[in-house]
Image (cartoon, rainbow, N blue to C red):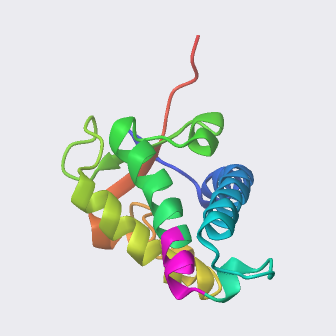
Amino acid sequence: MPISAPLWRRLAALLYDGFILLALSFFYGAVITLIGALAGWHQGEYQPMFHHWIVFVGWVLTLIAFYCWFWHKSGQTVGMRAWRLKLVSQFDNSQTPNWQQCLVRSLVAIPSVLLGGIGYWCSFFDTQKRSLHDRISRTQVLLTEKEK
């Protein structure tokens, strides 16, 4: 029987993924800066992200795409793999979530994390240790077996 992942492992995986998201953000910023320089957006300024709201939305969508891609493809991000976690559909523990579940999970996870992690604290009151974004997206994070 699959075991639900404990909160501390989930937070550790989130920390690992945070380093990758930071690198992805630097890359995104460099691409936007280059595009802005070539298009003449700044006219001498070096802060394109502060002047174009669409650039900020693009950055958020890039981070969401990172998670959705890995969750749908294998059920694991790099941080989740390191901590032996796997995201599965609640209805079939062997199936990775579909695109809709991944998108819903990502969109609910943003306020869930930003509001003091309140979405994660819900796992203390759920019998299956699911967070708020797990419950809403009908997914579950499971602890996987050690590889031999």
- Residue 21 is inside the magenta segment: no
Residue drawn at 33 percent across, 58 percent down? 102
Q: Which is nearer the eye, 70 or 61?
A: 61
Q: Can residue 134 be seen in this view?
A: no
Q: Which is nearer the eye, 80 or 65?
A: 65
Residue drawn at 27 percent across, 60 percent down? 101
Q: In which quarter of the image is the N terminus?
A: top left
Magenta region, residue range? 52-58
Q: Which is nearer the eye, 109 or 65?
A: 65
Residue 32, image quadrant:
bottom right
Left or right of 136? Residue 51 is: right
- Residue 56 is inside the magenta segment: yes
Find residue 75 and report its horizontal and vertical position in percent.
40, 41
Find residue 57 and report its horizontal and vertical position in percent.
49, 78
Count how many numbered circles sit on residues in the image.
0
Residue drawn at 64 percent across, 40 percent down? 83
Residue drawn at 73 percent across, 82 percent down? 43
Q: Is residue 9 visible?
A: yes
Q: Which is nearer the eye, 43 or 10?
A: 43
Q: Quadrant of the C terminus?
A: top right
Left or right of 88? Residue 54 is: right
Residue 46, image quadrant:
bottom right
Find residue 119 and report its horizontal and vertical position in percent.
50, 78
Q: In this view, does 104 lie above or below 6?
A: below
- The kind of secondary structure the magenta stretch mainly shows is helix
